[in-house]
Image (cartoon, rainbow, N blue to C red):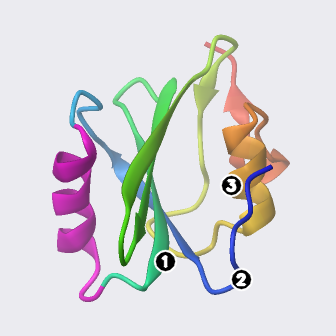
Amino acid sequence: MLSISKSAVIYLYDHPVDLRKGCEGLASIASSLVKEIPSEAYFIFLNRKRNRIKILYCSLNNLSYWFIRSRKGVFAPKARLSSAITQADLIMILQGKFPSHLHLKKC
């Protein structure tokens, strides 16, 4: 079971990203987005078609990421780059489910 601390900040990047990038490439994008990365943060990146997601986890000692591919549609968030994504939303995304306000549009 994934445990996300209450102090974690979750960002959604709304521009398409080349998801061939690894941890370091995504981390450089993340560091250009925010002035100072919090001690624990998640950054959600989407590809151009919005059917694939990479979630980068940054902490003081770790960099890791998850890759998720949708087979049923495209990920169409209404949010812009912000910390508006909740912990519950992130856990649902990691489980392959999409919250209603981060809905899937049919292709």
Asked whether the beta carbons under mark 3 and mark 2 sit within 8 Å of each other, the answer is no
Q: Earlier in the sequence, mark 3 or mark 1?
A: 1
Which residue appears farthest toward the front when viewing the image? Answer: 61
Q: Which kind of residue does numbered mark 3 sit on?
A: Leu
Write down the region rendered in magenta.
22-36
The residue drawn where x is 59% and y is 34% is 75
- Residue beneath label 1, please? 40
- Residue 86: horizontal and vertical position, in percent? 72, 68
Residue 42 rendering spot, x and y as whole percentages: 49, 63
Amino acid, disc 2? Lys
Q: Amino acid at mark 1?
A: Glu
Q: Specify which label sits upstream in the sequence, 2 or 1.
A: 2
Which residue does the image show at 65% across and 18% down from the upper left? 73
Q: Principal SS element in the magenta part? A: helix
Tag 2 residue = 6
Q: Which residue is mark 3?
A: 90
Q: Dot 2 lies on which element?
A: loop
In front of the other: label 3 or label 2?
2
